[in-house]
Image (spheres, helix red, strand yellow):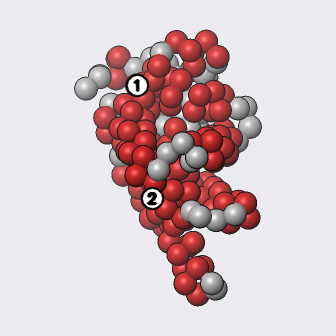
Amino acid sequence: MPSLSDIPPPRRPSVHFLLAHPAHFLALGFGSGLSPVAPGTVGTLWGWLAFLALQPWLTPLGMGLAIALALALGWWACAVTARHMGVADPGSIVWDEVVAIWIVLWLAMPMGFWGQLAAFALFRYFDAAKPGPVAWADRLFKGFGWRGGLGILLDDLVAAFCTLLAIALWRHFIG
């Protein structure tokens, strides 16, 4: 576990930082996290588009395995990138949003464009506003190392669960 003296001073990521380490490239969502405006929303949008691009090539089981691999690699990448940036949960790390929207779409599909847009909007609401359980998950694991990497991912996973719950309730009561 790194000591505080091993953590560099906070830095804003650049294209050079993005390309300096494979963990940075992954954690910053292949560059979508470099957006100067709403990087979490841009990362979620990139995740949505990436899901749609992958979907014809993967079976549902294949997508589930890809998500499991993305979670494991993302845990490592988020922990490394946060440490290198000197910030426990930087907004430019968007891999958590990417994997979370993949989970939402994987479990809620099939649905058309408007259903996907509603899922996107619901997820962004839960991730940004952090109501109830999402705020709890956001506070649970803070810091650097494996614990911090898990903390970066966890609140988005809970936001994905809340999104899926809202979709399930909508489908049950509305149709």
Task: For marks 2 and 1, give the CA distance.
Answer: 22 Å
Q: Quadrant of the N terminus?
A: top left
Residue 57 shows in the view: yes
Image quadrant assignment for residue 88: top left
SS class, disc 2: helix
Residue flagged by tag 2: what amino acid is it? Answer: Val
Q: Residue 158, which numbered label?
A: 2
Relative height, residue 24 to residue 153 (above, below): above
SS class, disc 1: helix
Quickly name the residue at label 1.
80
Q: Which residue is drawn at 40% across and 25% down?
A: 80
On screen, residue 129 versus residue 69, left or right, reads right
Residue flagged by tag 1: what amino acid is it? Answer: Val
Relative height, residue 63 to residue 30 (above, below): below
Relative height, residue 165 to residue 102 (above, below): below
Q: Residue at x 45, y 23 (%)?
A: 23
* Dot 2 crowding, Cα within 10 Å, few <14, some 14–19, many 20+: many
Q: Residue at x 39, y 33 (%)?
A: 73
Image x and y of residue 164, in percent: 51, 67
Instruction: Name the residue nearer the viewer: 47 or 111.
Output: 111
On screen, residue 29 versus residue 61, left or right, reads right
Between discs 2 and 1, the one toward the N terminus: 1
Residue 149 shows in the view: no
